[in-house]
Amino acid sequence: MKKILITGLIAGCILFVLSYGGLFLGVRFFPKLFVAYDNPLFNSDGNRDVLFYMHAFIISFALSWFWDRFKVLFKGTLLMRGLEFGLVYSVIALLPVMWISFSSLDITVVMVLSWFLYGLAQAIIAGLVFAKINP
């Protein structure tokens, strides 16, 4: 359990920094994509903002547990293990969530694809961290 928490915390810190750096760069270089977020669907009163900022840690702890449980199934080099881990997570978890989100919310295909690619990148990065720290 200690290994899961430590690797989850490390991956969470890395994902937090990369996520917010990526958000800054995304707004700077793809501003038209972010105009779609000026929508009442995405505006909150600020009471739950901390939940948004905790996302990198929540996903990292969940993925750390998943990695610890199934790491023996991922073979090959560190890079291949991280890529396969990210792809498995994306197909099993992200794809269904993106499907239901697109089908039930007033969001664009581009928005859903950006979320899917963002989640895939997070899972690959976390997989690389886990493969390095908790082989």
Image (tube, grey):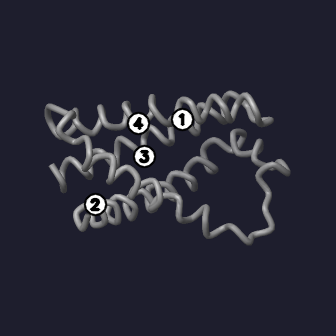
Residue drawn at point x = 70 percent, y = 31 percent:
102
Q: Nearer the viewer, residue 121 or 28?
A: 121
For mark 4, what is the residue? 89
| Element assignment for label 2 | helix
Q: Position of residue 80 (x, y in %)?
A: 22, 32
Earlier along the polypeptide chain: callout 3 or callout 1?
Answer: 1
Task: State the residue position of label 1.
Answer: 116
Quarter of the image that includes the N terminus:
bottom left
Mark 4 or mark 2: which comes first in sequence? Answer: 2
> Is residue 49 shown above or below 66?
below
**Amino acid found under the numbered disc labelled 3:** Gln
Q: Which mark's residue is nearer the viewer, 2 or 1?
A: 2
Q: Which residue is rendered at x = 14% and y = 35% of the image?
A: 77
Evaluate if marks 3 and 1 touch, with contact meaning CB atoms under 8 Å apart. Answer: no
Report helix, strand or loop for mark 1: helix
Q: Nearer the viewer, residue 97 or 54?
A: 97
Describe the element under mark 4 as helix, strand or loop.
helix
Q: Is residue 40 left or right of residue 32?
A: right
The answer to the question of whether label 2 and label 1 lie on touching residues, with beta carbons closer than 8 A, is: no
Compared with residue 64, is residue 121 higher up or lower down, i.e. above or below?
Answer: above
Q: Which residue is mark 3?
A: 122
Q: CA distance from mark 4 to mark 2?
A: 17 Å
Rendered image quadrant of residue 14: bottom left
Q: Is residue 25 left or right of residue 130?
A: right
Q: CA distance from mark 3 to mark 1?
A: 10 Å
User: Which residue is label 2 attached to?
Assistant: 4
Q: Within 10 Å of the Cα at label 4, are there few (<14), some (14-19), or many (20+) other Cα atoms?
A: some
